[in-house]
Amino acid sequence: MSFPHRGLAALLGLLLVVSPSRTLAAQISWNARLGATYTTTMVTDQIAGSSVTLRPTIAPTLVGEVSLPLRTRTPLDATAEFQVTTATLESHQSSGTTRVAGMRTIALSGGIRGHFVDVLKWRAGIGVISYATSEKAGVFQAGRPIKPMGTAALEYDRPLTATLHLNAALRYDVHGFSTRQLELNGYTGSQTVHRVTLSVGVGR
């Protein structure tokens, strides 16, 4: 079993441990948000003395999150979040920028959310992220990677109506990036990738 799959199994196990054994449907809350994600460089290489970097454009992002209260002395929620981004993967070098392929990421995370101050809440979690491209080219020729990640967020939540809330989140996540093709080409390590997402939506 690969490490990402073990990480996903541990994530699901964590949610089972921290979730209440009996949860009424009315206790479950949800929110859906739209936003944008900035991603740092995924691959850095040197070709003929010139630096070449690979990174996606700022990506439109869809986020869905569900949460339920825990039976703890300090109010906490167990949360699960699903995030999808769509961007263009680009190669940057001194001669200019070249489109490589369309790229989509799917990230699943589980974590804990608590009250920070006033209408602000914090969230911390772990999960996995999967990369897919529209063309099996370059670093993705030998397949798409699935990597473990850590995530943290600051969330804003306030009532709009008796049943709906306005929700906004500033999320940060980090993971190591590598692919099977990079390993076949002799890259033995991975590059740390940072992502920042700003999203706004509604929830119940």
Image (tube, rainbow, N blue to C red):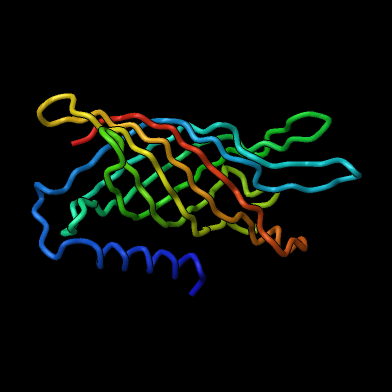
- Residue at position x 12%, y 48% in the image: 27
User: Does residue 49 appear left or right of residue 144 in this picture?
Assistant: right
In the image, 93 versus 194, the foreground residue is 194
Q: In the image, what residue occupies the spot 66% across and 53% down?
A: 191
Quadrant for residue 103, please give it. Answer: top right
Of all residues, the one furthest to the top in this rendering is 160
Instruction: Compare residues 19 and 180 and report the one nearer the observer.
Output: 19
The one nearer the camera, 130 or 81, is 81
> Would residue 99 be found to the left or right of residue 10 on screen?
right
Percent position (x, y) of residue 68? Answer: 19, 51
Where in the figure is residue 106, as x and y percent of width and height?
Answer: 45, 48
Residue at 48% x, 53% y: name it: 129
Residue 150: give x, y in percent of width and height: 47, 54
- Residue placed most toward the observer, 119 or 37: 119
On-image quarter of the C terminus: top left
Residue located at (25% from left, 30% from top): 202
Answer with left or right where residue 94 lies relative to residue 77: right
Q: Is residue 64 above or below residue 70?
A: above
**15 up-or-down from 32: above or below:** below
* Side of 43 where 175 appears, left or right: left
Which residue extends farthest bottom? 1
Residue 127: percent from left, percent from top: 42, 57
Q: How many marks?
A: 0
